Image: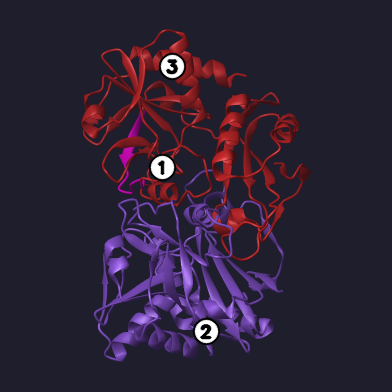
Chain colours: A red, B purple
């Protein structure tokens, strides 16, 4: 599987990279089919937003060109793009000027059981909570210890994903997915201004739902809201949409809004 | 300056290291003088605690041996030790078994103006707050975007350090230091069970103060407590103790407890 650093094949990285030292960077995980990146413009837009918020200078045209070339070489799989603030000296202050670094890693498409998409998945109730940090909320940055700790909470194949709450007990997301509910015909997904990753599939589904005239709100969601929902589903930019069928003793049916959004996601990923 | 990976000289790291991908690891910053690591056992104890909490397997005897050898080669400077969960596949779940990785980086001792230690420093009031995350609190882990964002808030040489509060407004620490106050002859330092880094110099000063019969408490500290303090000082494992002389319009004198702890820190760093 290919691996590039700053546009050239490379498997090894400077040990002084601030991505390693401080998680000082961002990443995107992009589905690639037939040499094409799915949701490319959304990934680039989120990356640009993240770089602006972290004050990392990045040549976006160059990143786009590299992604296109890398995806062509990869063919089918997953392209993971990491952007770091580049090498640093010791200490938190970035060197001035900093030279950001682009890392591309190819991997095979993950193979999930067919029934995740068809029958739905069971959520593991993660004990690890998401801290409220508005200045980092929404970003797909490299500080991901919360997700690592949440993901090691379960090993069984019974649970395909875990549910993460914030420290105040609000429902936020899955460990590697965003979450939607449908209640009374209205789609809802958690507000991500305190914590959570604003996924590109979530953004695209919100936009597509809006375009189709489906009612959709972004708001704080409690565990009670979740349990009272008619339908629950997860999404990300690799698998599309998975219905959620159970959390501990609670069950949800797979409903029509879930199937509608699932079909939209399928079209988006068959790029 | 030397750089070792897993005990051997190396400047380049696998691009699949989970330290880069997720900040999935820990670090220690160790003062080295005359080939000897200062506060070695405290650094190793904190690292062992961190590895236990993050469930990273580590051969501590091997780390100690490598640090001793590395410090001998470095002579005088700073040894930064990074331990990561090692290489990973894509996804948050660690590979099983994981093979943790040890990275040692040497650098020159930072040169600070003599007056930081003598006259004291002015604190920059950082706007970036520390999120409350008990499962990570106290650890010197690699998820350090909060510190990076706080450190880029000021560039002037007028401020040697920044003051960080948590999202609830409590006083926690400096960007790269711990903080103590003295009020009515009692030393106090913030409780770090919600956020913050439990520094080895802080731990050693607490222990030494206790041994000398100095009253010392670890508790939540408000901005009002800080402003009302008779003395304020910072510490870390490289510079020892710096008195704090000012924060915005407020001034503190450099007092006798600060000087006492500063002398203790000096002895510890002249190892």
Q: Which residue is mark 1?
A: A134
Q: Are marks 2 and 3 on the same chain?
A: no
State the image quarter where residue B244 is shown.
bottom left
Q: Is residue A128 above or below residue A72?
A: below
State the image coordinates of residue B260 (x, y, percent, origin top left).
39, 88
Up the image or down, A107 lies above or below B9; here it is above
The region drawn magenta spans: A121-131
Residue B159 in magenta stretch: no
Kindly report which numbered mark, 2 or 1, lies closer to the viewer in this rendering.
1
* Residue located at (70% from left, 35% from top): A63
- Would you identify the image quadrant in which residue B208 lies? bottom left
In the image, residue B108 above or below residue A80 = below
Question: Is there CB contact under 8 Å for labels 2 and 1?
Answer: no
Q: Compute the Cα span from label 1 to label 3.
A: 29 Å
Tell me the residue at 44%/34% (across/down): A177
What is the chain identity of the residue bearing mark 2?
B
Question: Which residue is label 2 attached to?
Answer: B38
């Amino acid at each position: 599987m290919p691996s590039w650093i700053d546009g050239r094949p490379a498997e090894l990285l400077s040990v002084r990279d601030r991505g390693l030292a401080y998680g000082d960077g961002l990443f995107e995980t992009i589905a690639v089919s037939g040499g094409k990146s799915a949701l490319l413009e959304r990934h680039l837009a989120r990356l640009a937003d993240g770089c602006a918020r972290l004050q990392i200078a990045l040549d976006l045209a160059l990143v786009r060109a590299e992604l296109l070339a890398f995806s062509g070489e990869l063919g089918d799989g997953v392209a993971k793009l990491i952007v770091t603030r580049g090498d640093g000296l010791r200490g938190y202050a970035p060197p001035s000027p900093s030279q950001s670094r682009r890392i591309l890693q190819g991997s095979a498409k993950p193979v999930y059981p067919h029934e995740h998409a068809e029958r739905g998945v069971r959520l593991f109730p993660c004990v690890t909570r998401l801290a409220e940090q508005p200045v980092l909320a929404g970003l797909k940055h490299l500080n991901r210890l919360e997700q690592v700790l949440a993901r090691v909470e379960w090993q069984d194949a019974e649970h395909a994903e875990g549910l993460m709450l914030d420290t105040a007990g609000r429902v936020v997301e899955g460990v590697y997915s965003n979450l939607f509910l449908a209640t009374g015909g209205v789609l809802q997904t958690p507000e991500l201004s305190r914590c959570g990753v604003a996924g590109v599939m979530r953004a695209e589904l919100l936009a597509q739902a809006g375009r189709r005239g489906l009612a959709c709100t972004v708001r704080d969601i409690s565990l009670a809201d979740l349990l009272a929902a008619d339908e629950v589903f997860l999404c990300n930019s690799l698998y599309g949409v998975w219905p959620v069928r159970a959390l501990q003793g609670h069950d949800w049916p797979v409903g029509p809004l879930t199937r509608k959004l699932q079909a939209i996601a399928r079209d988006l990923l068959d790029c």
